[in-house]
Image: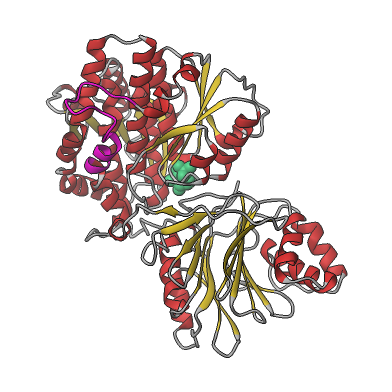
Amino acid sequence: MCGIVGYLGYREAYPILINGLKRLEYRGYDSAGVALIDGTGKLNVYKSKGKVSDLEAFVQTKSSEGNIGIAHTRWATHGEPNQINAHPHYSSSENLALIHNGIIENYGVLKEMLIHNGYEFKSSTDTEVLVQLIEFIRNKEKTDLVSAVQIALSRIVGSYAIAILEKNNPDCIIAARKSSPLVVGVGNGEYFIASDATPIIEYTSSVIYLNDKEMAILHRYDGLKIVTLDNEELAQVVVKLEVTLSQLEKGGYEHFMLKEIFEQPRTILDCTRGRINIDGTNVALSGIIDHKQKFLNARRIIIVACGTSWHSALIGEHLIETMCRIPVEVEYASEFRYRNPVINNDDVVIAISQSGETADTLAAVELAREKGAFIYGICNVVGSSIARRTHTGSYIHVGPEIGVASTKAFTGQVTVLVMMALTLAKERGTIDERYFRDVVSELNKIPQKIEEILIQNDMIRQLAIPFTYARNFIYLGRGVSYPVALEGALKLKEISYIHAEGYPAAEMKHGPIALIDAEMPVVVLATKSSVYDKVVGNIQEIKARKGTVIAIVTKGDSEVGKMADFVIEIPPTIECLDPLLSSIPLQLLAYHIAVNKGRDVDQPRNLAKSVTVE
Ligand code: G6P
């Protein structure tokens, strides 16, 4: 949450910063700001409420000169989203400007201390406390800026990724991180900093991922130094980026979300590439094979995740329990970390996170590590914090996901979980060879089958029209389709702001059935499965109460069509892979309803793609 970008070099900084903020806007978009030092040594700070485009409009008539600067796009935590609370924040003397991603938990006591020492505050943010604290220490201890920042950060409780500019020191940016991501880009005679690598890749593919409690000192003449908060200099580990610029563009689609939905045939192929053998008969995940004993000895698997990744985790529970016969527990990372969970050293903890930066999931990983569990990460963003804090893992390799509502990352996560379950089941001997081969062979056909669903996009667009003004939706599924119902409901509420609930189909009788009347659309996952007949029974219960049923069915089904008001067909597949197909029409349905309502599909209100605060 909150995006940070900085530039120091020979080019005009402002266009680089604005472009960078636009790439980071998925992290937050309620206000934005920029600080630049121009050729005369003047430090200009410009801020505005709203999106980066609002900031651009605001700066249009002002001087945006300078080849050093820092910029920020905000997702409010402390203080409402307005111009005053937007970053960068000045220190009292206006000599320092600071941007921050994270939360300073002890800001209250620090603020009191600073007020006692004569400091005044303009905003209600925790960030302004930090910049004032740095200035206070700088003046009181008569230290240089680096030492003042180090002392200030050692007094802070909480999380931060920060960047600071000093007016009297116009050739230097200082950046530091703890629990919030920060990447340094190393160009030829220029440096970049950013919350992730996306603002940097246009300029250089060489990056350094800062670790917790590390600080980067970028200097025009002295070069780059990475130091600890105790000022111990560290070796610079430069990593080559693999993301390309075209992966970050919309590629002709109206929204990133639509592009990402349509990318899924390819992203699933990318995810399975090198993991399924050439003739499509075997699957092996190296993360499992290399740590076979940990998994074979595991008495229990705990999966921790948030949001859409938590829904994938529920599918993972179903797959691993069915195929591998290992008990699996699925936990919201935010609950797990605060309830003193029982974790043993023969537990395996799987952390699922698209961004690899979700604060609660990262904290759950740290907790499980402390308690001795073996940790496996399923992440998308290469080099992300969670990927680096787990013992091993598998990337989903679906490429950058920009739309705030997760689509291709969900199917990528499920694909990895299928491959995990297959690999593990084979090692444990808990499934027969024939079933193993059937699942692998079907997994190979999934990209083609998703293509067949995507062809129905126009039909789904039409189908969405009558639901534009629906006020509520219910999504029902059973077995492995229950998490798909949860995910379908989440997609709809995230981007259309229509209230939607996902429920296990049979459980509907214990409450939600009271909501059903002619005004209530009910999306039912009714594909051919071991619980098909039961779901048909549930559809009858809805129709008896005049609910409007939109059913997702297996191609060729004739029974459900007689009862449902609308039907979307998906190709047949093996039951455990059904979520990879049935989730696609639900993504499209949510997308078209949100577009019809004129919603900001890629950047829905109040949400952020990467939730780096707890
Ligand atoms: C946010 C995003 C969701 C995502 C969730 C977990 O809420 O808007 O799309 O599912 O965070 O994120 P992660 O990166 O850990 O998968």
Q: Position of residue 67 (x, y in %)?
A: 49, 80
Task: Choose between 362 and 593: the one closer to the eye.
Answer: 362
Quarter of the figure with residue 12: bottom left
Q: Residue furthest bottom?
A: 40
* Res 278 → quadrant: top left
Q: Which residues are magenta?
A: 265-284
Residue 170, image x and y in percent?
61, 80
User: Would you say residue 308 sits in the magenta stretch?
Assistant: no
Q: What type of secondary structure mainly makes up the magenta span?
A: loop
The answer to whether residue 508 of the structure is visible from this angle is no
Question: Which residue reaches farthest right?
Answer: 116
Tell me if residue 493 comes above or below residue 187 in the rendering.
above
Residue at the image position 39 percent from the left and 48 percent from the top:
405
In this rendering, the count of numbered labels is 0
Q: In the picture shown, does residue 182 fall above or below 500?
A: below
Residue placed most toward the observer, 337 or 177: 177
User: Which residue shows up at 51% across the image and 83% down it?
Assistant: 66
Residue in front for this viewpoint, 228 or 112: 228
- In this image, 504 relative to 191: left or right? left
The residue drawn where x is 26% and y is 18% is 529
Q: Is residue 113 above or below residue 370?
A: below
Q: Residue 60: x percent and y percent?
A: 44, 84
Q: Does the magenta run of residues contain 276?
A: yes
